[in-house]
Image (tube, grey):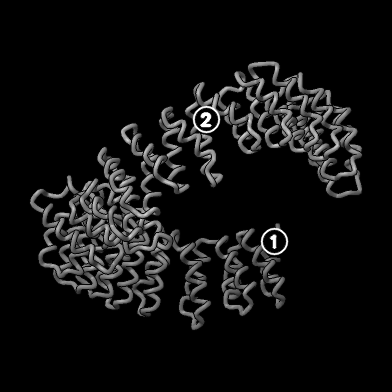
Amino acid sequence: MTDCKEILSMLTSPESDVLREGAYLAGEAHCDDAVPLLVEMLKSSNIGVQEAADNALRMIGGKEAVSGVIPLLQSDEAPVRNGSMDILRALGGNELQLIIPLLKDEDVDLRIFASDILGSAGNVMAVAPLCEALLKDPEVNVRYQAAVSLGNLGLPEAAKCLNQAMRDEEWVQYSVIEALSKIGHASSVDAMVKAMSHSSELVVSMIIDALGEMGNVKAVTLLLQRMESSPTALRNKIVKSIVNILGAKLVNLLPKAERENFRVYLLVALEDEDIEVQDAAILGLAAMGGDDAAAGVFSIASKLDPDKDQDRLEHILESLSRMGLTEVLRLAIMDPEPAKALLAVETLARVSAPEVEEVLSQAFWSNDVVVQRGIVAVLARIAGPASTDFFVDILARHNDGKVLKSAASFLGQKLRYAPAAESLFALLDHQYDDVKEAALEACVAIDGSEMQTRFQQLFKGIDPLKRLMAVYALGKMDAAGNIDLLKTALGDENAEIRKHALEAVASLCHDSEVWLELLVSRLLDENRDVRQTVVEIMGQCFSESVIPHLLHALHDDDDWVKVRALEVLGQHRVAQAIPEVVGLLENPNKLVTIRTIECLGSIGGTSAFRALLAVSGSEDFEIMEAAEAAIARLQDEQEREI
């Protein structure tokens, strides 16, 4: 370690680089003798030198550093004063005996700085001197800063003197209120409420907000007593604070005699311009309920922008739903303005009441199609068997695609309602593909011998899309029972049908050996996607019996089929595949080569390692990088095994 004398010599150098290095060494060595020189460096115009000195002084710390920096608080240069303040905030907590006397200095600024520094001390010993400054210092700005610092300390020991300071002038009261809200001591509730009688309207407003943030239930009774005599603006703030304190427990916690009065005040607060006051009133009214409350809340919701006010609207709708099935919602769902009707639908979707289902069903046919879509989507989610006739009627009378999709989902997936089979099957001819898909899933869900017969007949047609739907449906409903039809589908002229038939056959892989025979027959399919699907299915239904066929796929004419085969062999770590796999390292397609390397890295073993080592010196960076990664993987696995 560098000697302190050498460091002191470096700190007198005219070279900034040497000064920075010296400061670093002084901090590392905790060289107390360097403090005066480091303090001088804080005055440098070179920012790098300043920072080096700052860091060193923080590392050295102790009385020497603190006492050395204190004089800089009286510097005429703001950057020097601010820098010294930062250092003392960091170090002063352990050297309070050097900071506290500054509170008695004749220089007002120095007393303010000392109050500020003590707020970062994190030491209960700073409370008493700050309290004395708060209550006795003749300068208002010192008292203000003392209150701020007591709040920053956040210690309950400060509550008593802060309570007393509530009688100070308005400027100090601001910081006192903020400090008390941070500390949250129960004794402060009385002091703050008492101060309301002799404070300005602005201070009273701050006190009310602070009591709400503190959340002490004791404040509720005191605030309620102030409501009658308060002007509307302050009364609305009191409403907000009480709701913030009591929250959803509002109804149960308010004295019975106060409930109805408070409900009236909540309704008035809905008209306040302050959004926070409005939202508090909405939360309170959600707990109390009533049609007049629902009307006021719904009116606010209807004026919001669903995109810009998404989060707020979400909270408001939750509050509306807690009021239950109000007359407001019954009327709003029939509103000629679709936006309002949809708002009612969205709210009703959250209301847990058996009547909701009936209200939505009755409103459906009287509404615009946009609202109908919303209603039927909600009903499809919340309705039960009692709404079966309603949905069957929709299938018979409606022609909107989105409405029909919801009806198909309800009758098919949710109820599996067999009497609707004919209507649902007819939707397979609908003009929109998404409706066809919904109808197809509904038919699959209903299942049954009659439904299977319908699809078996559908497969005999000339329309490839209908044959495709038939293969999909029969494969889902009963692949084993329709195996002959699926065999036929494997030879269909349409490649998509062959792919779906393969996927249907694959569902039998754990129940029957016939699946593999059928699968292998398509390894020579003329379509690349079909062959690729075969390989992917072999990976999903992997067994020893598929390995020869996967090795065969390594020689496919299409590189993507090769890649899929490599991925499957690597995934299942098929060691016997290594000789065949190694042969692909010379493939002209770089992608195939890289996937081959990855496959060898996954399989592992001596042969794979040697092959990878051979290509790790490739001139192609990507191939070399892939080989190195694969080798690293093998080494990691070997180390874990050891």
Q: Nearer the viewer, residue 449 or 118?
A: 449
Residue sitting at x 37%, y 74%: 111
Q: Nearer the viewer, residue 508 or 315?
A: 508
Residue underneath mark 1:
3
Crowd around label 1: few <14 · some 14–19 · many ≥20 (10 Å): few
For the C terminus, give its image quadrant. Answer: top right
Q: Quadrant of residue 267?
A: bottom left
Q: Nearer the viewer, residue 512 or 276?
A: 512
Q: Is residue 265 above or below residue 456?
A: below
User: In the figure, is residue 56 to the left or right of 567?
Assistant: left
Residue type at the position of mark 1? Asp
Disc nearest the viewer among 1 and 2: 2
Where does label 2 land, which residue?
Answer: 444
Q: Is residue 347 above or below residue 629?
A: below
Q: Tell me if I can see residue 627 in this picture.
A: no
Element type where label 1 sits in the image: loop
Q: Earlier in the sequence, mark 1 or mark 2?
A: 1
Residue farthest toward the top in the current orientation of the protein: 512
Residue 450's place in the image compared with 201, above or below, is above
In space, the residues marked 1 and 2 are separated at their CA atoms by 86 Å
Q: Residue at x 49, y 76 (%)?
A: 81
The answer to whether residue 410 shows anywhere in this view is: yes
How far across and how far down the image is residue 493, in percent? 73, 34
Residue found at x 57% / y 60%:
59
Q: Residues within 10 Å of mark 2 (few under 14, many from 20)?
A: many
In which quadrant is the N terminus drawn?
bottom right
What residue is rendered at 27% in x and 55% in y? 332
Q: Is residue 441 left or right of residue 384?
A: right
Percent position of residue 30, x then y: 60, 59
Residue lying farthest bottom? Answer: 76
Residue type, label 2: Val
Res. 185 image quadrant: bottom left
